[in-house]
């Protein structure tokens, strides 16, 4: 089994000739999202068709490349009506929203798992967006849990929501692990935690894997050395998964993946593990908020600043070039005749008349070649500009440059302020976490001394 995005960017090699032909740019799924029909090698244009590799022409999938039978394996999508229709189909599976039949949104499809031997789609990776994936992680949705696929929505059974919700990762997984440990601790779960630790030891020792692994949930993708996914993250292990893992020499990886998922449900020392998990989750949250702050900054003022810089670049490129149409002001006075050279004064007058966009879209940009003699000034002739000079400057250019400079200064100052405030807050939280860790250590030491004193006292009473 493979993940679709792991194929993107890999070289396409010819088995017959040993040539490197193209690279994979996309996957083509059938309209029902149940089968990988082809790999896209070259995207098509307005007058050209995409080049694709039909699934039947693929010899093997490797860790670093996809091998096809020969150069003829790459064809134009227009050669096969079914492929042409699929490539031109705007209804893409990736990015489609996933809802239960009861109307609850579970996320959107972000990747596809498929069997490289049959090209059948086995399942999908469901994402909750950048923020959702960071806090909760992605989930695995098997194709047999899908009840229908429409133009905008994929429907699943309502009970599927509980299965996806149970696949918790990211920050929420760390918090959930701490919460589960707390519940176990308050119920006197020392014995159960010891049993969980024994289970993990059994997993790692590979004792009776068929009995201990089947039905357990994985905590990460289990892959072969060639990059093929044996069991995706979040899915329950089946007997054939264990067989494939053993044949690939990845049984230890499978047991580690199961142990990783099981570790979220248990701990070694209740109070210490709970505090440590909470502090770890808080640290992850600090890192997460830093990333979110960067996203908000890049999506805020910088957009306007980049637009202003582009406008300045367009103006600088236009000045000194001819204009391809007559530019008039609101009273139909001529600012520039067709063929006139664009000057800074013309830029300002056109801006004042509300026609700057029209002017910048009418700049003559063809390359003009001159001979060396044409570039020389005739002997005895004083050089003179062919454009009449005008008094005054281009206020709009000055304003745009000032706007960019001010925005850069404001953003730098704002970033420095936010960095100082965030760093101070993180330092304070880290200091509190260290203090709590010391206090927990002292409490454990005190309890150990009390237990020792009680045992000594009991021994004396017995004597």
Image (cartoon, rainbow, N blue to C red):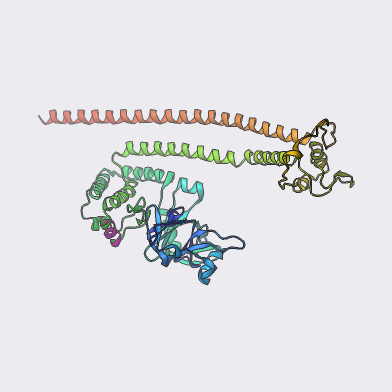
194 and 284: which is toward the camera: 284
| Spot occupied by residue 156 in the image (x, y as percentages of width and height) | 46, 63
Q: Is residue 211 visible?
A: yes
Label count reads 0
Q: Is residue 102 visible?
A: no
305 and 291: which is toward the camera: 305
Q: Residue furthest left?
A: 463
Q: Main SS of the magenta segment? A: helix
Is 241 covered by the magenta stretch? yes
| Spot occupied by residue 319 in the image (x, y as percentages of width and height) | 75, 39
| Residue at 46% over, 28% down | 427
| Residue at 29% over, 50% down | 253
146 and 303: which is toward the camera: 303
Image position of 367 (left or right of 62): right
28 and 81: which is toward the camera: 81
* Quarter residue 241 falls in: bottom left
Q: Residue furthest bottom?
A: 81
> Looking at the picture, does residue 81 appear above or below residue 160?
below
Is 174 covered by the magenta stretch? no
In the rendered image, the quadrant that contains the C terminus is top left
| Residue at 52% over, 70% down | 79
Q: Magenta stretch: give its range.
A: 240-245
> Looking at the picture, does residue 111 appear above or below residue 394?
below
In the rendered image, the quadrant that contains the N terminus is bottom left
| Spot occupied by residue 373 in the image (x, y as percentages of width and height) | 75, 39
Image position of 264 (left or right of 410): left
| Spot occupied by residue 273 in the image (x, y as percentages of width and height) | 33, 38
């Amino acid at each position: 089994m493979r993940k679709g995005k792991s194929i993107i960017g890999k070289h396409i090699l010819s088995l017959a000739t040993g040539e490197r032909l193209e690279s994979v740019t996309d996957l083509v799924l059938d309209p029902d999202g149940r089968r990988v029909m082809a790999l896209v090698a070259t995207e098509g244009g307005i007058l050209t068709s995409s080049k694709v590799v039909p699934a039947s022409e693929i010899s093997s999938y490797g860790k670093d490349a996809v091998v096809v039978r020969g150069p003829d394996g790459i064809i134009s999508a227009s050669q096969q009506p079914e492929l042409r229709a699929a490539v031109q189909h705007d209804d893409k599976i990736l990015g489609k929203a996933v809802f239960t039949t009861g109307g609850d949104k579970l996320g959107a499809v972000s990747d596809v798992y498929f069997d490289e031997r049959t090209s059948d789609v086995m399942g999908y990776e469901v994402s909750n967006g950048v923020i959702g994936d960071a806090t909760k992680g992605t989930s695995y949705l098997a194709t047999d849990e899908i009840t229908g696929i429409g133009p905008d929505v994929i429907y699943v059974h309502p009970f599927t929501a509980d299965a996806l919700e149970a696949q918790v990762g990211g920050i929420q997984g760390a918090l959930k692990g701490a919460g589960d440990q707390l519940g176990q601790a308050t119920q006197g779960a020392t014995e159960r935690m010891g049993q969980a630790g024994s289970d993990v030891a059994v997993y790692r020792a590979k004792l009776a894997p068929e009995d201990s692994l089947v039905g357990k949930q994985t905590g990460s993708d289990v892959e072969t050395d060639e990059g093929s996914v044996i069991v995706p993250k979040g899915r329950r292990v089946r007997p054939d998964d264990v067989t494939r893992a053993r044949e690939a020499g990845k049984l230890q990886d499978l047991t580690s993946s199961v142990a990783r998922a099981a570790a979220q449900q248990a701990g070694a020392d209740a109070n210490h593990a709970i505090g440590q998990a909470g502090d770890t989750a808080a640290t992850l949250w600090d890192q997460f908020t830093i990333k979110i702050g960067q996203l908000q900054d890049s999506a805020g003022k910088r957009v306007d600043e980049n637009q202003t810089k582009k406008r300045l670049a367009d103006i600088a490129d236009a000045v000194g070039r001819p204009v391809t149409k007559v530019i008039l002001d609101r009273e139909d006075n001529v600012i520039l005749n067709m063929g006139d050279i664009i000057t800074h004064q013309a830029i300002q007058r056109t801006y004042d008349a509300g026609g700057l966009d029209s002017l910048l879209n009418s700049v003559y940009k063809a390359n003009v070649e001159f001979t060396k003699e044409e570039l020389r000034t005739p002997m005895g002739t004083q050089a003179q500009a062919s454009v009449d000079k005008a008094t005054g400057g281009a206020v709009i250019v000055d304003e745009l440059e000032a706007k960019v400079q001010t925005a850069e200064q404001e953003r730098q100052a704002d970033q420095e302020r936010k960095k100082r405030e965030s760093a101070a807050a993180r330092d304070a939280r880290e200091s509190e976490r260290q203090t709590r860790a010391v206090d927990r250590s002292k409490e454990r030491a005190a309890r150990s001394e009390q237990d020792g004193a009680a045992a000594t006292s009991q021994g004396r009473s017995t004597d």
